[in-house]
Image: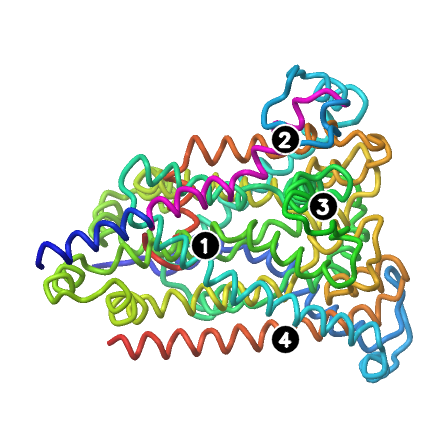
Amino acid sequence: MNVMAAQRWNFWGGIITALTLVWAILWAFPLYWGVISSLKPDDEVVRPYIELWPETPTLENYISALTTTQIGAWYVNSVAVAVGVTVITIFISMLCGYAISQLRFPGRIALWWLILASFMVPISALIINHFVLVANLGLINSWAGIMLPQLIHPVIIIVYKQFFDQVPKDFREAAVMDNASEFGILFKIYMPMNWGVTTALSIVCFIWTWNAFLWPFLSVTRTEMMTITVGITQVNDAFGVYYARQLSAAVLAGLPVALAYLFFQRRVTEAITLSAGIKG
Amino acid sequence: MLRNFRTERLVALVLVAPFMAIYLLTFVYPTVQMFRISFTDAPLIGAGRWVGLDNYLRLDNDPMFRRALWNTAYFVLMTVVPGTLIALLIALGVSRLKGRFQSIVLALFFLPYILPVSVVYLIWDWTLNFQFGIAMHVLDWLGIPRVPVFKSRVWFLPAVAGVTIWWTAGFSILLFLAGLRSIPAEIYEAAALDNSTRWTTFRRITWPLLWPITSLVFTIQLILQLKIFDQVYLFSIGGRPNDNMVLVYYVFQKAFQQNQGGRAAAVAVTLFVLVVVVSVLQFQLLRFAERRRR
């Protein structure tokens, strides 16, 4: 490459990098703006000009959101549902993925195809019958009712199966020779080998469930049983036109998942890439 | 090697049983029921009379259903193609950066994807607020008259599509980045030795090698956006949901607000079939791309 070309290459490269940076800042700006607005007192929020920093930062909106709405109860509901769904989903998916990967049994191939095919099913088309089912079980307005239709994530089984497939067959054979029990093999050999995947999948499963809207919205009619993602949109009257208070509720609702992402950035991106069927 | 097949089968049954039980209960059974009640005049809860194809025939003359279908298609068009291209552009920019700096910039683009839809709604409802939104100050400054974005018939769906792209781009960016990383550096070095321009390099190397990822992102987006509900519902609060009707919203309205389970199920079946058809096409497309790569 001659010198001129190299210089041209670097010049445009610099421009592209600068544009990417500006774009990233503009992209994240609404998030910043939401957080900043939630820290302003009522009269500052509605000022007819742009103030990028609150003149008198205050937590009064947060205190007001926490004391005048049922946000505490919504938090408890969200945590209970998200943890419950994550634990159950990860557990049943791991068992199923292990069986398909390591054991030979009639119907194994059919089951695998069934799981692959379930990708196609649009869950949002099933809302009517999910509602009928959960209502018949008497689970409307309960944690179990919010959780039940969210327990099937075919993606998680597929990722587990792929990971178990990669474990050399010798491990299992050696363990069988040693008379280890089948459950012993799964829990003492295969599971510890795949802690990384389990952690990554658990974090994204938690995030997915925390963020779920349609089903928690339909299956709960009592305010105190709502999850936080639904709750903050359903009580507009309680806030009146107090935008800052509404935004502070939004910040409180988004905080756990945003923190989960920022702390486990690599794990989250890994699991999301895996779930799309690409090994990152 | 000797395997005890009977024990193995028994163990497999025990391991698969919890998943199968929940799968049958929350997947298979509701799907069968959806098809069944779509041929009846059942309310949301309770039995109905068999009416044959009546619910489906009614859809043909139902202006609201047509609007839902049309709006869904319009929304898909406005999110899928631009969303895929924007994500590709961002991924190309981010992939040039190195180390810590790259992960910070990626985080800025990715954060919206991690947030619940209701938080996204509140943030944008505030940003685009007609009276106090910061975007309106910018419009004033540019000398463009303010628009009540989410109360406007013309701007509603494009605005929700824009917010949706902002919200979901992170996922596509991640896939594109993984794809870009898998292109060997030597190919680019060879291109640089040949003095090929940035554009030629992109057109001849990056784009063709990235094609399988592009089609994957495209179809994932397509299926996702066909099922649009949350954003449309939320931004329609206090607005005009009937003008912004989309398919899932129509299922919701018929079943939960008008108590017509059977007719809602007919709409749901339509959506179901639509998504299955697109998924099968996607699967064929990916298989085709795979074969071409070999």
- How many residues crowd around disc 1 within 10 Å: few (fewer than 14), some, or many (20 or more)? many
The first of marks 1 and 2 along the sequence is 1
Does residue A102 appear in this view? no
Render colour scheme: rainbow
Residue extent of the magenta highlight = A16-42
User: Is residue A41 depicted above or below B113 in this figure?
Assistant: above
**Pointer 1 and pointer 4 on the same chain:** no
Q: Give the residue type that dot 1 points to.
A: Ile
In the image, A147 versus B183, the foreground residue is B183
Dominant SS of magenta comes to helix
Q: Which residue is mark 3?
A: A216
**Image coords of residue B248 (percent x, y):** 73, 63
Q: Residue at x 78, y 19 (%)?
A: A67
Q: Are marks 1 and 4 in contact (CB under 8 Å)?
A: no
C-alpha gap between disc 3 and disc 1: 24 Å
Q: Which residue is mark 1?
A: A157
C-alpha gap between disc 4 and disc 2: 36 Å
Which disc, if any, is residue A251? 2
The first of marks 3 and 2 along the sequence is 3
